[in-house]
Image (cartoon, rainbow, N blue to C red):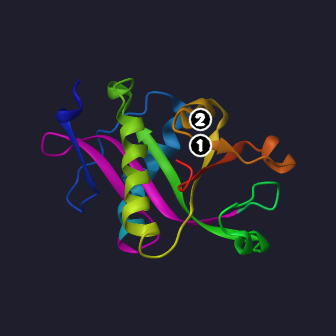
Amino acid sequence: MPDSDYTIRKLEASDTVQNFKTGNPSFLPLKTFLQKQAKQFQQSSVAQTYVAVMGDKNIVGYVTLTCSEIDLQNGYELADCNQANHYEFLPAVKIARLAVDSRYRSFGIGSTLVDYAIALIRDRIAENVGCRFVVTDAKSDAVSFYEKQWFVLLDSEDNQSAEHRMMFLDLIIV
């Protein structure tokens, strides 16, 4: 499936999300979020969801973004802004949800959605507000996917034993 077969845009109120398939029962919360919460979160400005759409309305993947922060007191320093290293938390945007319909996996849609999110954060958010990092809480089986997208694990004891491990991307480095 070539990249031109789908487009990425904001979730719309008229989008039908009932046909989204996760395949694996452990991904059911991702389907539930898309079907029952994503539109409400969007209307309430809690999070924004961007969808990969084939044709007019067939959603084949989505990424949800929200504001966040990251505690980098555990060894990651900003060489270009020493004063920022004195703050306990630094601004970030969080990839709160990322899912691809099970029928469309292995076509690069997940990677394209992450690339889209990073470009959006870099070009629209960081440029206008100030935001240095992208973060996500990765399930153990998703860590390698995010590492391929240049995310690194937060190096802390708590994070090493967490069920969902915090990963981050420094927008200045990438």
Q: Is residue 154 left or right of residue 61?
A: right
Residues at badges 1 and 2 in contact (C-beta under 8 Å)?
yes
Q: Residues within 10 Å of mark 2 (few under 14, many from 20)?
A: some
The residue tagged 1 is 151
- Which span of residues is magenta-colored? 43-70
Q: Main secondary structure of the magenta part?
A: strand
Q: Is residue 69 magenta?
A: yes
- Give me the residue at 67% from left, 34% from top: 140
- Residue 102: give x, y in percent of width and height: 38, 28
Vertical side of 50 occupied by 56: above or below: above
In x, y percent, where is residue 130? 51, 73
The dot on residue 147 is 2
Secondary structure of residue under mark 1? loop
Q: Secondary structure at mark 2?
A: helix
In the image, residue 82 above or below residue 158: below
Residue 40 falls in which quadrant of the image?
bottom left
Give, as a three-letter code, the residue at label 2.
Glu
